[in-house]
Amino acid sequence: MEMPTQMCLPVKSCKAVKCCCGKVCKGARGLKMHQRSCRVTDDLEDELQQQMIEALNDDNHGDNTDPVNPEISHLNTQENFPDLKRGIKLPKSLLQWSTANDFFKLTFLNHPITPDNLNNNINTMVTVVYNYFSGNFGHVDNNSSVEFERKYQTFSTKDLKKVLKKLKLENGSILEIKFVAKKLRILLNKSNNTELHNSDSHASADIDHDNLI
């Protein structure tokens, strides 16, 4: 009697995938099943759909109104810059990037980019990406410079060199690397100016001013 062979799923299909609500699912299929009842995903899709409807209404309203002066209308369009959002933190490991990539692939299956409404589709894509990273990794702290100043206020030039080297090797925060490099540069400039002043003072003291008169 021949025994039926048991089907084994590939390892990649069981890879953990994190939803935007924070729940870790087993593979893409598990994420898709979870998102059917996920309130966060439903709220996000409702918000994106509402934004798309509002954008379509704005486009239709703009198409129906004929500008009196095309040049003035063109200038006004250029001056309507989008509001800047808070900076977001990005993943630091390959696993986190892979999880984010899997999430985006599944999400954009429901919101494919089409040439019919390209601008709104791109805005939707940007919103999904921004909300994912801000929700999972947080925002960049605007008061980070104050925290760095307190952290490194007693560090010497030698200590700052070690910290800077370590931050670069470990792919540390760009803001922290810039702060340490700037502080180190300031201390080195002060040290060079002090040494130059002392050398000038010693040279002046060695001169016999009586013989020069």
Image (cartoon, helix red, strand yellow):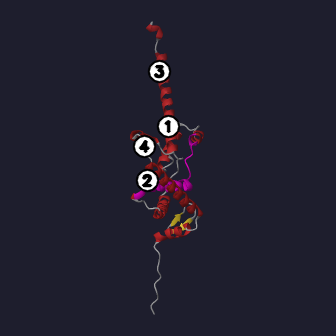
Report the Cα–Cα distance between label 2 and label 4: 21 Å
Q: Residue at x 56, y 52 (%)?
A: 138
Upstream in sequence: badge 1 or badge 3:
1
What secondary structure is the stretch in magenta mostly built from? helix
Upstream in sequence: badge 4 or badge 1:
4
Q: Work out whether 112 lies above or below 197.
A: below
The residue that disc 4 covers is: 67
Q: Secondary structure at mark 4?
A: loop
The residue that disc 2 covers is: 119
Q: Residue 32, position in %: x, y?
A: 52, 68
The residue that disc 3 covers is: 200
Q: Nearer the viewer, mark 1 or mark 3?
A: 1
Q: Which residues are magenta?
A: 116-145
Specify the amino acid type for callout 3.
Answer: Asp
Report the Cα–Cα distance between label 1 and label 2: 40 Å
Upstream in sequence: badge 2 or badge 4:
4
In the drawing, does residue 73 fall left or right of residue 148?
A: left
Specify the amino acid type for callout 1.
Answer: Lys
Tell me the crowding category of disc 2: few under 14, some 14 to 19, or many 20 or more residues within 10 angstroms, Cα based: some
Q: Residue 128, position in %: x, y?
A: 50, 57
Upstream in sequence: badge 4 or badge 3:
4
Q: Residue at x 52, y 66 (%)?
A: 16
Residue furthest bottom as drawn: 1
